Amino acid sequence: SQTRHYDYDVQLASAINTDMDGNRITEASVARARPRGKLRGYMGKAWLDPHNSGGEITQMVVCEGGIGAVDFMADKTYCP
């Protein structure tokens, strides 16, 4: 759950998310590496995408934030 430089957590997303096309994603898992000090934050999300033309597929993304970044993907399923 933590190291000298980061605190880690995984949970369900608390907000409705949107993908890059503006589609609503109602359920997503969120993983965070929250920096302790002057380091970059990291966030990842995984979700079942019902908007794929070939049927539902699992999608995931991992993003690197700025120095001290915590919830920079709060309502998105893509890197800002």
Image (cartoon, helix red, strand yellow):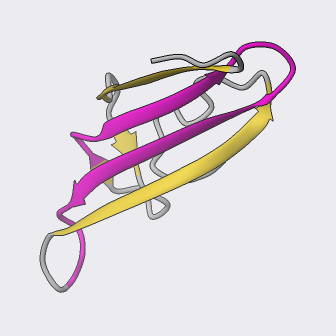
- Residue at 33% x, 63% y is 59
Rendered position, 38 above or below 67: above
Rendered position, 36 above or below 43: above
Q: Name the one closer to the observer, 33 or 54.
A: 33
Q: Is residue 36 magenta?
A: yes
Magenta segment, prevailing SS (helix, strand or loop): strand
Rendered position, 10 above or below 23: above
- Residue 57: x and y in percent read 20, 70
Instruction: Please identify the quarter of the rendering in which residue 5 is found.
Output: top right
Q: Name the one closer to the observer, 58 or 10.
A: 10
- Residue 69: x and y in percent read 72, 26
Q: Which residues are magenta?
A: 25-53
Q: Is residue 33 magenta?
A: yes
Q: Name the one closer to the observer, 35 or 28.
A: 35
Rendered-image quadrant of the N terminus: top left
- Residue 75: x and y in percent read 46, 34
